[in-house]
Image (tube, rainbow, N blue to C red):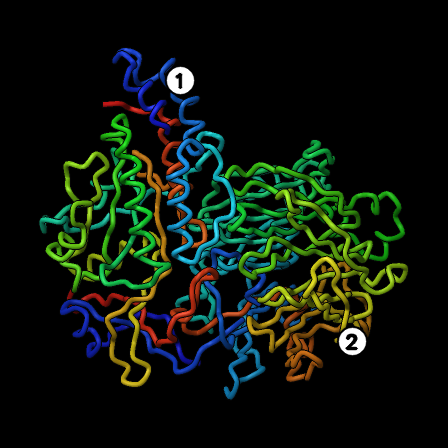
């Protein structure tokens, strides 16, 4: 695997730019587009073929080294290692690895552990094919009182982290922490627990979605440490435990970081996805317990409203909708249901009246779904939470890749994470080997050029 | 700030300036500032639209929010418009500073030209308020030291770079990439040299994600803007927020 964003002398090119310094990096001939639709709008995107898929993987006792790890998979078409694991970086120990997110320059990946409350920062810019752990942040609880770092969402120069719980009672009341890219705590922002816009906030949190065009932040809600670390079978039989799930979403003023309205969205609304189509003013979520799709949209007066727009599967069967993935043009939505292992494609041409138009079983269980920016490639992983995954033979753990032509999925490869002695496959993120090809979300399309990173080589003898 | 509120400030007797009653009065005066001038808002919208950026909201009033300390503004070796060696820290403290990284031949409508329009708008808007004189500066630092010599930047700056302006705009470059790159790295500003896909030779264009830094008088970065969240109205209100925070030092 060629290195891409490293710095080394390239004297011939150096002369063209400066007599005293050299440029770095070998420019790659091809590029990438990627599930860029879930990234922060402040993170530059891969608007082509993704080169790598990172999988944040839960360690399992007796499987390999048993540690949580960042697994790197080569997905470059034509590569000798296409569809293979090319790197695995253990962080030492198990802490309930869950989600991750890019820094605003996409040179670093932050990844969280819901039980240990550790936040790991990986350098994925110097050599994207070989991530390097450069920082472990351990002061989240001390600085904020929050527990369970879940969503990592970049702001310019900072990382916004949505927590799931709190250290006081390990319930669902929690908040958002902001750290600098250097890993230093900046601020904390509690989820609303009072009436805002006439609706009572429950204080719960889960995901974050920012729409900079509207200066808004949208949050959802799940459950606290007491539940997400409990065995799923035990929890569903515990009436008291089942009372402790979030039933709200909240829209915030991004600048002031104050919630401006709370919405009743019963049944644990999870992932938040804004339509990225220019001028669109809506976001979508799926409720885990009640199996509904909700759209949060501005009305004609500019007021934000929540709308129940569709039912996923048969709610009585508790299909448990989990991850969703919106197409870059906002016209389609993948919805995974964990219990039946199905992926479902919804036509969102009319977001107020979406329709399920396709479904297929991916495995005995399925959680995360990530699609490429052009929507032609779709990736799936399996793990929900260490204690919520299925048992026995139904505990399949894999990364699967499919091609999507708008009508059907065509299987391309499967990596069995147990057979490879890796663990439980959870969150996925794409990366390009050549970071110069990344494009800002809001940028106009420009001519596709190869690029070299400005880089410095110290003169010999210095 | 409206002309009326600026007039009130100017009419205050010197002993009342700088704190206490004055701060309170100015807080009320500034709170309505962003909505007071429709022409400024229209121009702000035009600038963002030209860059292809949608900013479909009314900016929060200055002082209604907190700008947190993000990090200390990194230092480095730079050249001013006269070719004199200076420290970047001379330009990131003592006044509220708006800093961007640019190169003079950039033609990306959502890049340097966008930043230039934003800065130009802010310079004119800020200069309408003499009470801000000495409190604010704008800084554009080139990441193309080979072509953006002090002489070239002097031409690029034109009257905007006139040191006697009420809101001075400093145009800086560096002596070499050796001096430049540590600054770019410390600020998290990625820059790539475009390369001809066929010949692999460097072209004259540089790819970068636009970043603009708002820095307080104490060299602390308080806000960072990218193309997705940069508009004159938003930045102006953030500058006023910092001024309100410190009670505003009047000349």
**Chain ID for label 2?**
A
Q: Residue A379 at what x, y percent from top left?
A: 64, 74
Q: Residue A335 at what x, y percent from top left?
A: 72, 66
* Residue at 41 percent of width and 71 percent of height: A437
Q: Quadrant of the N terminus of chain A?
A: bottom left
Q: Quadrant for residue A418, please give it.
A: bottom right
Q: Are marks 1 and 2 in contact (CB under 8 Å)?
A: no
On whether disc 1 and disc 2 are found on a single subunit, the reply is no
Q: Nearer the viewer, residue B4 or B164?
A: B4
In the visual, does B73 lie left or right of A407? left
Rendered position, A35 above or below B224: below
Rendered position, A49 above or below B6: below
Q: Residue B188 at what x, y percent from top left?
A: 36, 55
Question: Mark 1: few, some, or many residues within 10 Å (few <14, many ≥20)?
Answer: some
Q: Quadrant of the C terminus of chain A?
A: bottom left
* Residue at 51 percent of width and 75 percent of height: A50
Task: Read off the residue under disc 2.
Answer: A361
How many angstroms separate mark 1 from mark 2 (CA)?
A: 66 Å
* Residue at 56 percent of width and 48 percent of height: A161
In the visual, does A225 lie left or right of A242? left
Residue B25 is marked as: 1
């Amino acid at each position: 695997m060629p290195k891409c964003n490293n710095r080394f002398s390239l004297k011939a090119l150096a002369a063209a730019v400066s007599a005293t310094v050299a440029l770095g990096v070998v420019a790659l001939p091809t590029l990438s587009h990627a599930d860029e639709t879930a990234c922060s709008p402040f993170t530059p995107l891969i608007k082509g073929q993704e080169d790598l898929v990172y999988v944040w993987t839960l360690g399992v006792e007796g499987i390999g080294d048993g540690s949580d790890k960042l697994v790197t998979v080569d997905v470059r078409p034509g590569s000798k290692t296409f569809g293979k694991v090319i790197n695995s970086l253990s962080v030492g120990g198990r802490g309930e690895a869950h989600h991750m997110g890019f820094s605003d320059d996409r040179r670093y990946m932050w990844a969280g552990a819901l039980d240990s409350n550790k936040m790991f920062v990986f350098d994925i810019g110097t050599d994207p094919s070989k991530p390097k752990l450069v920082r472990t942040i351990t002061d989240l609880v001390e600085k904020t009182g929050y527990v369970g770092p879940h969503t990592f969402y970049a702001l310019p120069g900072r990382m916004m982290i949505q927590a799931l719980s709190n250290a006081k009672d390990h319930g669902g009341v929690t908040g958002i922490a902001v750290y600098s890219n250097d890993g230093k705590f900046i601020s904390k922002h509690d989820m609303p627990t009072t009436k805002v816009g006439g609706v009572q906030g429950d204080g719960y949190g889960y995901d974050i979605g920012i729409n900079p065009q509207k200066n808004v932040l949208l949050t959802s809600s799940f459950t606290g440490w007491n539940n997400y670390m409990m065995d799923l079978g035990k929890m569903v039989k515990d009436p008291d435990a089942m009372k402790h799930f979030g039933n709200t979403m909240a829209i915030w003023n991004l600048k002031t970081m104050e919630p401006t309205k709370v919405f009743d969205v019963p049944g644990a609304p999870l992932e938040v996805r804004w339509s990225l189509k220019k001028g669109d003013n809506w976001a979508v979520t799926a409720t885990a317990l009640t199996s509904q799709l909700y759209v949060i949209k501005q009305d004609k007066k500019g007021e934000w409203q929540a709308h129940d727009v569709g039912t996923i599967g048969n709610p009585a069967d508790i299909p448990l909708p989990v991850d969703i993935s919106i197409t870059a043009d906002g016209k389609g939505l993948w919805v995974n249901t964990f219990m039946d292992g199905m992926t479902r494609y919804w036509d969102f041409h009319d977001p107020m009246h979406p329709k399920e138009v396709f479904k297929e079983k991916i495995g005995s269980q399925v959680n995360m779904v990530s699609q490429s920016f052009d929507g032609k490639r779709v990736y799936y992983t399996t793990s929900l939470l260490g204690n919520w995954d299925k048992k026995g033979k139904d505990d399949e753990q894999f990364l699967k890749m499919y091609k999507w032509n708008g009508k059907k999925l065509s299987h391309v490869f499967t990596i069995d994470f147990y057979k490879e002695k890796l663990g439980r496959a959870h969150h996925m993120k794409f990366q390009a080997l050549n970071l110069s090809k990344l494009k800002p979300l809001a940028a106009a399309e420009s001519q596709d050029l190869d690029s070299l990173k400005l880089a410095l080589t110290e003169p010999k003898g210095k | 700030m409206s002309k009326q509120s600026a007039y009130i400030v100017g009419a205050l007797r010197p002993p009342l300036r700088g704190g206490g009653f004055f701060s309170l009065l100015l807080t009320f005066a500034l709170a309505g500032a962003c909505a007071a001038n429709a022409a400024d808002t229209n121009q702000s919208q035009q600038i963002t639209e030209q860059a292809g950026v949608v900013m479909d909201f009314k900016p929060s009033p200055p002082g209604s929010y907190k700008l947190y300390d993000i990090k200390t503004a990194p230092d480095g070796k730079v050249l001013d418009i006269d070719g004199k060696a200076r420290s970047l820290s001379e330009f990131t403290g003592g006044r509220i500073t708006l800093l961007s990284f640019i190169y003079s031949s950039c033609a990306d409508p959502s890049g340097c030209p966008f930043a230039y329009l934003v800065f130009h708008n802010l310079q004119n808007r800020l200069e309408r308020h003499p009470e801000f004189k000495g409190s604010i500066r704008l800084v554009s630092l080139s990441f193309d030291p080979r072509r953006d010599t002090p002489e070239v930047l002097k031409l690029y700056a034109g009257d905007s770079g006139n040191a006697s302006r009420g809101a001075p705009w400093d145009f800086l470059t560096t002596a070499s990439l050796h001096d430049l790159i540590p600054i770019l790295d410390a600020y998290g500003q990625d820059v790539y040299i475009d390369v001809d896909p066929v010949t692999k030779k460097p072209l004259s264009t540089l790819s970068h994600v636009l970043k603009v830094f708002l820095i307080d008088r104490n060299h602390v970065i308080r806000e960072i803007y990218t193309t997705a969240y940069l508009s004159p109205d938003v930045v102006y209100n953030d500058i006023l927020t910092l001024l309100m925070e410190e009670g505003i030092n009047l000349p």
